[in-house]
């Protein structure tokens, strides 16, 4: 009998973790959302690394599409290494750290607070240095995460960002979609991508494609291939892949397109179909593809949560794929749970 990994258990816990987050942190979302309304920031910046940075990219697209404010990612080394003095008093900053104690993330968050920005920490650890460095600290309520590869903390960081966005903007459609997430995610974690696993075979490299919020999902997926399976995977915008990286796409080159039910779906499908025409081993989470292979997904009824739901069946796939390749997804080679960079 195969012993279930921590990673698999934590994937299965995502629906419950999201429900817990929406219930227990509701008051904190309101408080931070009010601070954003009162500040009315001209721009936002994000501060994060690794999976947290992919969550920040997702939140970037969500803010730009919903609140109409430009969002930029700050390099944490600007504060910790270079000592740069940024003028952020007209904006807001979102710092994301599961552990809440990576020195460079904390330093950049503190610098943003000192500069006059409204700063909000999304963390799975309270109290923590990141919480102390920011004006507002939101507990993402993911609970203990024992596997080195982040799963439920990644999802809950994004859900926390979206919940914050609803309190800031009053977006009723997004609020309703968030309330439905535990049920939707309960279905998504049961989906299997066995066809994708069967076709990958001995592939040593692949592309993960997406556009808009789904680009953040593609980036997270590429990282998880590297973390859990020592497999080279690169994430690209489905449009950007045509500007150079397409040169590597040849017969049976594997690629996975994360297509959400949003304004970008048709363009993603068009591009992945063109790559399938080059005899690439192309898979996509869309019913619109014809030459590429379809992967199962759960539609949520909202373009933002639809993109987020795509990561759940992928997590299930990559955990199983890692084990099939002889790896332990709970303990990736040369990695540890908390990475403290300066």
Image (cartoon, rainbow, N blue to C red):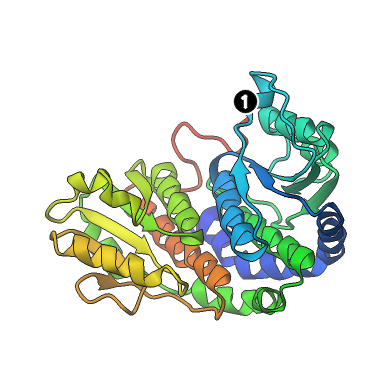
Depth check, front residue: 129 or 305 = 305
Percent x, y for residue 243? 28, 46
Q: How far across and down, in percent of the image, does residue 184 sit? A: 57, 78
Task: State the image coordinates of residue 83 (x, y, percent, origin top left).
Answer: 70, 19
Left or right: residue 46 versus residue 265 is right
Q: Is residue 300 above or below residue 6?
A: below
Residue drawn at x 88%, y 59% is 31
Query: Residue 177 at what x, y percent from top left?
Result: 64, 77
User: Where's the C terminus, which quadrant?
Assistant: top right
The residue depicted at 38 percent of the width and 75 percent of the height is 296
Q: Which residue is mark 1?
A: 77
From the viewer's perspective, is residue 72 above or below residue 176? Answer: above
- Above or below, comparing residue 304 to residue 3 in the picture: below
Q: Between residue 279 and residue 6, name the one nearer to us.
A: 279
Task: Give the residue at x 34% y 62%.
Answer: 257
In the image: residue 124, left or right of residue 66? right
């Amino acid at each position: 009998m195969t012993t279930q990994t921590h990673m698999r258990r934590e994937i299965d816990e995502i629906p419950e973790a999201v429900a817990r987050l929406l219930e227990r942190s509701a008051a904190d979302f309101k408080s931070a959302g009010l601070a954003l309304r009162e500040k009315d920031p001209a721009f936002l910046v994000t501060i994060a690394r690794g999976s947290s940075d992919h969550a920040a990219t997702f939140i970037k697209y969500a803010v730009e599409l919903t609140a109409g404010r430009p969002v930029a990612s700050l390099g944490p080394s600007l504060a910790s290494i270079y000592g740069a003095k940024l003028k952020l008093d007209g904006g807001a900053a979102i710092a994301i750290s599961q552990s809440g104690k990576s020195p460079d993330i904390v330093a950049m968050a503190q610098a943003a607070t000192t500069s006059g920005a409204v700063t909000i920490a999304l963390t799975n650890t309270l109290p923590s240095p990141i919480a102390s460095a920011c004006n507002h600290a939101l507990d993402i309520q993911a609970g203990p995460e024992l596997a080195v590869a982040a799963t439920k903390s990644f999802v809950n960081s994004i859900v926390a960002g979206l919940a914050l966005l609803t309190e800031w903007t009053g977006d009723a459609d997004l609020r309703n979609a968030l309330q439905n997430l535990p049920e939707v995610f309960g279905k998504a974690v049961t989906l299997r991508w066995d066809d994708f696993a069967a076709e990958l075979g001995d592939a040593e490299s692949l592309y993960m494609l997406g556009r808009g919020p789904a680009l953040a999902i593609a980036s997270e997926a590429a990282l998880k291939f590297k973390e859990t399976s020592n497999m080279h995977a690169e994430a690209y915008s489905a449009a950007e892949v045509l500007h150079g990286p397409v040169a590597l796409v040849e017969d049976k080159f594997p690629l996975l397109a994360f297509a959400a039910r949003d304004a970008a779906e048709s363009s993603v499908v068009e591009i992945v179909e063109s790559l399938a025409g080059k005899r690439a081993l192309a898979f996509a989470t869309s019913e619109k593809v014809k030459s590429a292979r379809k992967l199962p997904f759960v539609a949520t009824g909202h373009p933002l949560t639809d993109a987020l739901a795509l990561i759940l069946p992928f997590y299930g796939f990559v955990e199983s794929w890692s084990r099939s390749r002889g790896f332990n997804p709970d303990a990736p080679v040369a990695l540890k749970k908390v990475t403290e960079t300066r």
